[in-house]
Image (tube, rainbow, N blue to C red):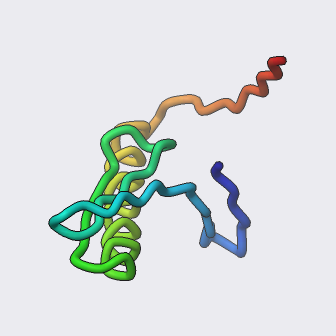
């Protein structure tokens, strides 16, 4: 799930993340952003790290999409 609010020029977005406890700590990824994942020794650290990973991902996408048209589509299925 992705949701966002716009306040002036700042966009506040929320992303669904999946957290998996492993023997090394916590693995975390964002299904809506392919390849966007991180980890942490604790769940709290993993959540903080994925925020940085999401921001980095979005900055890279912003640069790659510069000048491209962006559209939103709605799909319904049963």
The residue at the point 62 percent across, 69 percent down is 12
Residue at the left extreme of this rendering:
24
Q: Residue 16 in the image: x percent, y percent?
A: 56, 55
Q: Residue 9 in the image: x percent, y percent?
A: 63, 70
Instruction: Determine whether, in the image, residue 30 is placed left or right of residue 76.
Output: left
The residue at the point 31 percent across, 41 percent down is 35
Quarter occupied by residue 48:
bottom left
Instruction: Determine whether, in the image, residue 3 is placed left or right of residue 33.
Output: right
The residue at the point 60 percent across, 33 percent down is 70
- Tell which of 56 and 50 is nearer to you: 50
**Quarter of the image where the C terminus is located:** top right
Q: Residue 32 in the image: x percent, y percent?
A: 51, 42
- Tell which of 68 and 59 is nearer to you: 59
Quarter occupied by residue 13:
bottom right
Q: Is residue 7 above or below residue 38?
A: below
The residue at the point 42 percent across, 40 percent down is 66
- Tell which of 18 and 48 is nearer to you: 18
């Amino acid at each position: 799930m992705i949701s966002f609010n716009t306040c002036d020029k700042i966009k506040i977005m929320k992303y669904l993340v999946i957290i998996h406890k492993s023997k090394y700590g916590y693995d975390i990824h964002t299904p809506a952003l392919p390849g966007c994942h991180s980890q942490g020794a604790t769940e709290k650290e993993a959540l903080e790290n994925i925020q940085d990973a999401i921001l980095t991902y979005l900055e890279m996408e912003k640069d790659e999409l510069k000048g491209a048209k962006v559209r939103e589509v709605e799909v319904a299925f049963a």
